[in-house]
Structure formats: C-alpha cells, structure tokens
Amino acid sequence: MYKGLVVGLSVAAAVACGGGALAASDRATVDSAQLQAISRTFVDIAEQITPAVVGVSTSRVVGGASGGAPPFFTDPYFRWFFGEKTPDFGPRDHEEEGLGSGVLVSQDGLILTNAHVVDAADHIRVTLVDRRSFKATVVGVDKKTDLAVLRIDGEHLPWVPFGDSTALRVGEVVLAVGNPFGLSQTVTMGIVSGVGRQGVGITDYEDFIQTDAAINPGNSGGAMVNTRGELVGINTAIFTQSGGYEGIGFAIPANLARGVMGSLVKKGRVVRGWLGVSIQEMTPELAAQFGLASPRGALVTDVVKGSPADKAGLKRGDVILTLNEREIHKLTQLRLLVAATEVGSEVELTYQRDGQRKRARVAVGELPEEAAAVPEAPEVTGSGLDNVLGGIKVGAIDRESARRFQIDPATRGVLVQDVVPGSAASRSGLIPGDVIVEINRKDVAGLVDFNRIAREIKPGQRVLVLISRQGQTLFVGIEP
C-alpha cells in the first residue's frame, strides 16, 4: 500500500551496494529522494489513522471529604456583611474529570480503550478530529487486561483495521497516536523494543508490546500502528520514575484486544478457558530438584478438586511442558494460552512427573468469576538438625499463630516461626508465617511428621519443601 517506503529502501540499498559508481551530487539526490519517500509514507499513515483516534473525556461525582464554601464567600464585602461567622457548608460533593484516548475499530462505532480510562465514570464523551462529539455507552469492561469497549452512534465514522500483532518483530517501526496532556491526535514514532513482556505488574493477563515511541499521560487507550496503517496495539502504560516519558512504553497486543472485544460485545463479559491448577514459575533450583536440564515449564502447586485438570489426572508436582505442542517457557505463557482457548474444547498437555514424560487430554472449562481457592505437640526448633532445615524454627498452628499470620486454623502442616539469617532456609526465601505442608514430596500433617522426615535428611542434601503462603502454595528448593 505504501510503495514510497519500499522504493526509498530499495534506493538506499542500491547506494550502499554501488555507491562508488555514483557522483556525489547523484548520491545527494538519491538520499533526498529516499528521505522524501519515507516522510510521505509516515504522513500518509498519520492522515489515515488520526481521524479514527478519539479523545475520551470522563466525569464522575465523588463525595467531599471536607467542608468548603462557594467562591464568593472569600469576597471581602461578603465577609464584612456576615462577619467571621460564615455558614458551615460541611462536606460537598464535587466532580472529577479525566482525559484519555480511544480507537474506532468498526464502522458501527465500536471503540477500544483502556479500562482505567473509563473506570467508575458517570458520563463519557468521545470527540473526533472533525470536532464531532458523541455521548458514549460502555459495552463492557475487562479489568484483567485493562481493556474497555465503548460505542457511539454516528454516521460516516472513520475506523482502523486490525493487524496481526503476533507478526511484530523487535526493531520494527511503529507509530503511537493519542491525546497526551489533552493535545489531540498527537503522533509519535519509535520502534518495537520488545514483545511478550510479562510480569510487569500492570494487569492479570500480560503480553505487552514494549516501545520507545513517546507515550505520555492521556495517551492511554490510543493506537499503536505498523507501517501498513494497521492497529497492532492499544497504548496502555509507561515505565517512569518522574511521571513523564522515559523511553519505555507498553501496549496491549491487538490480537488479545480483539478477542476481549469480541467476547464483551457478544456476551457482555470475557469468557476465559480454565484448567483448575495453581502454577509456579520454574527456577534453576527447582529445575534441578525436578530433574529438568533447564528452567522451563509451569510447576503445578495445586489442583482444584473436580476441575478439568483433576479429571484428567494432573497432580501437584507435575511440570507442564507443552500445550498443543507449544512449548511452555513461563507460567504466564500457559495462563494466556489457556485463557484464549475456547471453553469445551480439548487440549493436549505434555507434563513431567517423577522424571517421566506423560500426556493428558484436558477438556477446558470456563474460568469462574472468582477462581476457587485451593486451600498437637510442643514447639520444636530446627537448631539441633545438621542439615539444611537446621536454620528454621517451626511450631504447631494454634489459634494465636493462625490469627497473627492470617492462617486458617484447620490448615495441616507446621508453621515457620523464625528463620536464621544467612542459613540455607533463609537463602532459599523461607520466611516466618510460611506453612510447610510437604518435605521431599512427603506430607507433613504436623510436628510429628516434620521431626521424622527432617531427621532423615543427610548433611549436604538438598531438600524440596512445599509451603503455603498467604493462601498460595509454592515449591521451594533449599540448597546446602
């Protein structure tokens, strides 16, 4: 579509390969033509895209936390009339306003934006580049991906076609379009700095595109487009220590946004696939404990009773390696793949159990709105042990300790009450409040089990413990 860019790059290649055959004046002419072709390409993209990128203004009424008088009460003549005894107005409600961006993605007025742009808004208005303004209605909001879908009713609306965000490559040129600081239809250019960014801590389901195209406050919900003028991302957040642009921005991939939008439009909510397992990232220490050559896969720490995974025979301690022959490198990758799988369809898992590879076919269920939580003797100290457990102090779970560490009193296991600084247990990450429920894959129901199993561990032997921490179960490898 944009032949100028292709022509410009071809000319540049010709100069690079055979520059010696061209006079200086000829090379200058070629360089100028190349720059003009590239410039026209970006101008064409901007002209095509900016009409479909809209300003989103929101307002909401919030309760006043403190009293406040109308402005005219500060007038000297008014105060002279009333004296110092001005009326007490008490707490007053006030209106908060917000600004953001959005992208028209269909002829019938569907707009993609961020959930945080429209969160708790009482009124939403959308303004186009031609100054038309519309009241917008919320089709649906998905906070787990920070996406929202709005709709406006208008004629001859511009819109941006979706591109394939999975085809993006690091180094590819992209444009970011939005309304930073209320400056409408601002276009910035940069490259894709990274793809598949996860663990950023912004949303529950993360697969961000990272870019150095300038994204500032007000850009949220705007468009990231490729050099074909296709929507490849929804600008969402920046990494900053100053509150302004610092060269690291994040966008939600268009493929993920398109799927979320389709579910919100059809069902008013996002339907996600669910296996019914709690999973943990595989570390080098855990990989050695589970007999893996390198840290990969997702370690199963719990299986919800009656869930699809439970029915397929998966157990705690299994390491999921592939889903439908796609290798799992991180637990977030597995979460995204499962969430995007159609409910009721079957997937094939490859997993490792006790050093043996196994396969299972799992009928994917629907993720519940709130995923189900997978829920004696005197105090004993580990100081007498000459192994890696010698640096912890454990005890029974009584009412006082359960209250202090917010543990269900019915929890089976032993409570870690103290960890010696610098000990093997401390280096592994064990902390007071952890509940040890397994040692080397053996159940620890209480102090009797802990004492028996702990004394069987030899000096210099590494140990795998399963702990419960704030309602989550985790494997921890303790190295001597």
Image (cartoon, rainbow, N blue to C red):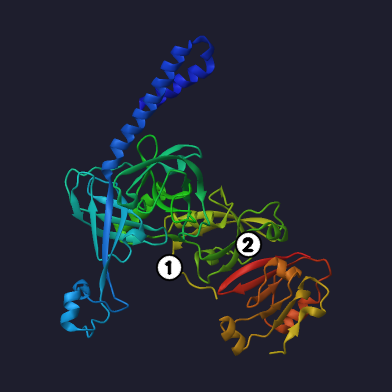
Please state which amino acid type lies under the numbered disc 2: Asp
| Above/below status of 181 relative to 308 | above
Q: Secondary structure at mark 2?
A: loop
What is the spatial separation of the Cα atoms under label 1 and label 2, in whole angstroms?
23 Å
Residue type marked 1 = Pro
Name the N-terminal-most of marks 1 and 2.
2
Q: Which residue is mark 1?
A: 368
Q: Is residue 299 left or right of residue 114?
A: right
At mark 1, the secondary structure is: loop
Residue 410 in view in this figure: no
Q: Which label belongs to residue 318?
A: 2
Q: Position of residue 267 (x, y in %)?
A: 31, 60
What residue appears at the point 24 percent right and 54 percent down from the top-left corner? 151
- Category of crowding for the residue at label 1, using alpha-carbon neighbours closer than 10 angstroms: few (below 14), some (14–19), many (at least 20): few
Q: Quadrant of the C terminus?
A: bottom right
Using the rendered view, name the quadrant where residue 390 is placed.
bottom right
Closest to the observer, 56 or 273 = 56
